[in-house]
Image (cartoon, grey):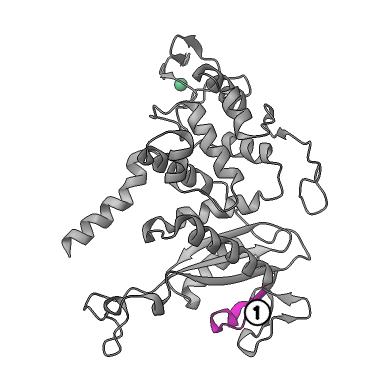
Amino acid sequence: MKNKLGRYVDKSYICTEKGVVMNFKSLQHLLDYFKDEKTGVKYYEKLRWNGNPICPHCKSDKPYIVTTGYKCSNNKCYKKFTVKVGTIFECSKIPFRIWFAVIYLCTTNKKGMSSHFVARTLGIEQKTAWYVLQRIRIMLRAQMPELIGTAENFAVEIDETFVGGKSKNKHTKKKRSNIHPHLLNDGSPYKPKNIVVAAIQRNGLVRAEVIKDRKEESLKPFIDKYIPVGTIVNTDDHHSYSNLKNNYQHSTVNHSAKEYVNGSCHTNTVENFFSHFKRMLHGTHHRVSDIHLQHYVDEFTVRFNNRNLPISLAFEKTVANAEGNALCKNITHGYKVYLKTKKGK
Ligand SMILES: [Zn+2]
């Protein structure tokens, strides 16, 4: 049952849009239930197809049952498939028991989990745990809201934050040179901190992206894409937001004059989001590489958006949306490109 704000208020609610499956109360309950692979396949078939298998290659809905799974009855397709095809579980030898346990931990732990923690908890290798977590993060991106600010009369707050270590804590060699601002003291190129921008509707959903700088031309595409014209928008007094008044009901708080609330205008909700996000980065992961930062942002954002759901429903919602292409080669592609450019230098 939902209240006016679209939040689930009835904690006994265990239905997904595709039907009731299981109300897992703890990790132990989940691990006890998925005692073999057959149970996992049966559970995921119920959740994905609700008892009516569909060919992932041609969408034909009457396949034959064969020993390994299904075979399409469409004579132009005629391919064999299992419930894993077309999902993040494809081409993976890891049993459903482990996959579901990681997804359960990932949806319930507010500050996220490191691959080392998952490896220790479930008795798998750290590399395996990293791939499983990374595939889950890529899948979660598809669950990000497409529009922020669809509910009327609730302001959307936009702000950006810097991600990275403080300069005062760096070794002298790694500090920015006073003579050449584009170099470090050891002569290597200076790299500015990463920036994450977020838009959150009060009492609603959030969307966050990594952007290259705080200039108007970098912020505008994000705002135009995810916030409908005419929405009430609250920001700080940063000059990149000065043209928002043309399309939005824009009001600001002057943080540089230590003004944090101006009537109903403030950015405290989005500051709260960043506060929790940074606690995840500092407390759990300690350091996140630049090329994977967006994946961590996606993971945290989806968990933040599901914060009012009961645990079992958040878990089933995530598993039910596990379709998508997140194969190993796609996950490591960015890292291989990064290594090549590093070698080239
Ligand atoms: Zn087919």
Q: What is the span of residues highlighted in magenta in the rendered image?
A: 234-246
Q: Amino acid at mark 1?
A: Lys
Which residue position is annotated with label 1? 245
Query: Of 89 and 146, which appears nearest the observer?
Result: 89
Res 178 quadrant in image: bottom left
Answer left or right for 83 relative to 287.
right
58 is higher (above) or lower (below) than 128 = above
Mark 1 secondary-structure assignment: helix
User: Foreground: 22 or 234?
Assistant: 22
Kindly identify the residue that appears in the image at 52 percent across and 17 percent down: 38
User: From the viewer's perspective, is residue 149 above or below residue 158?
Assistant: above
**Residue 28 is covered by the magenta coloring:** no
User: At which x and y percent is residue 236?
Assistant: 62, 79
Q: Position of residue 316 (x, y in %)?
A: 63, 35
Q: Main secondary structure of the magenta part?
A: helix
Give x and y (percent) for residue 273.
62, 63
Please tell me in which quadrant of the rendered image residue 240 appears. Answer: bottom right
Q: Tell me if I can see residue 120 in this picture.
A: yes
User: Where is the C terminus found, in terms of image quarters?
Assistant: bottom left
Q: What is the tally of numbered marks visible in this picture?
A: 1
